[in-house]
Image (cartoon, rainbow, N blue to C red):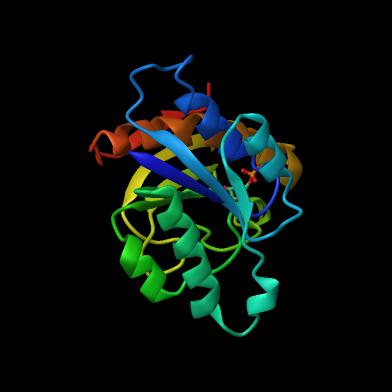
Amino acid sequence: RRVAILISGTGSNMEALLASMDPAADPEHPATPVLVLSNDPRAAGLAKAAARGVPALAVDHKPYRGDRAAFEAALDAALEEAGAELICLAGFMRILTPAFVARWQGRMLNIHPSLLPRHKGLRTHERALEAGDAEHGCTVHEVTAELDDGPILGQARTPILPGDTPDLLAARVRRLEHRLYPLVLRRFAAGDRTPVMLQDD
Ligand code: GRF
């Protein structure tokens, strides 16, 4: 399976995914990265992908302001050119239209920093603390037309500890994301959609 990774920023999940697909690390991996795409030309992740020898491209959304369909047509053109069969959203901060999602339905994954269905949207670490949740974590799911919705493919949990702050929680969850996303992608690319559950250790 040929995988494209869509980012907007740091790209730490992208790096974890790329490392996991490196033939030196996992010669039998069923997926291979063919493109890293960012809507922000300044995304730090682009240089990291290029350093790993993966084609990295920016499709700046700004010139398309007001015309999401045209922006997504440009995304689709790049994805097609690369021969992408699967998409991993990894900190991609643009909302995708139902038409784009429908085209990629069943072939597009996302990682979200909460235990969905709790805390869809932004500021998830703050909100988990404010809500007094006993645990927190991250979710990899198939992307459907609803934001942060769609079949759950994996979750990783960590207890919320006394003294936790949004930053401490974010760092813990980020480490879990880097374990969970590669694990789910490997299974998904091999046709396995049964959810996988991880616990912080
Ligand atoms: C991650 O927390 C991810 O769950 C969220 O955006 C963040 C991306 O971070 N959707 P990075 O660019 O992978 O470092």
Q: Position of residue 58 (x, y in %)?
A: 64, 56
* Figure disc tally: 0
**Residue 31 figure quarter:** top left
Q: Is residue 190 visible?
A: yes
Residue closer to the observer: 145 or 57: 57
In the displayed structure, does residue 106 sit left or right of residue 173?
left
Q: Position of residue 40 (x, y in %)?
A: 69, 59
Is 23 located above or below residue 185 in the figure? above
In the displayed structure, does residue 143 sit left or right of residue 72?
left
Is 97 located above or below residue 58 in the figure? below
Is 139 located above or below residue 53 in the figure? below
Residue closer to the observer: 65 or 76: 76
Q: Position of residue 22 (x, y in %)?
A: 49, 23
- Name, please, the residue furthest toward the bottom: 66
**Residue 194 figure quarter:** top left
Residue found at x 72% / y 37%: 168
Q: Is residue 159 visible?
A: no
Is 34 located above or below residue 126 in the figure? above
Q: Position of residue 117 (x, y in %)?
A: 42, 57
Residue found at x 63% / y 37%: 49
Residue found at x 34% / y 59%: 150
In the displayed structure, does residue 79 sit left or right of residue 38?
left
Residue closer to the observer: 100 or 79: 79
Residue closer to the observer: 127 or 47: 47
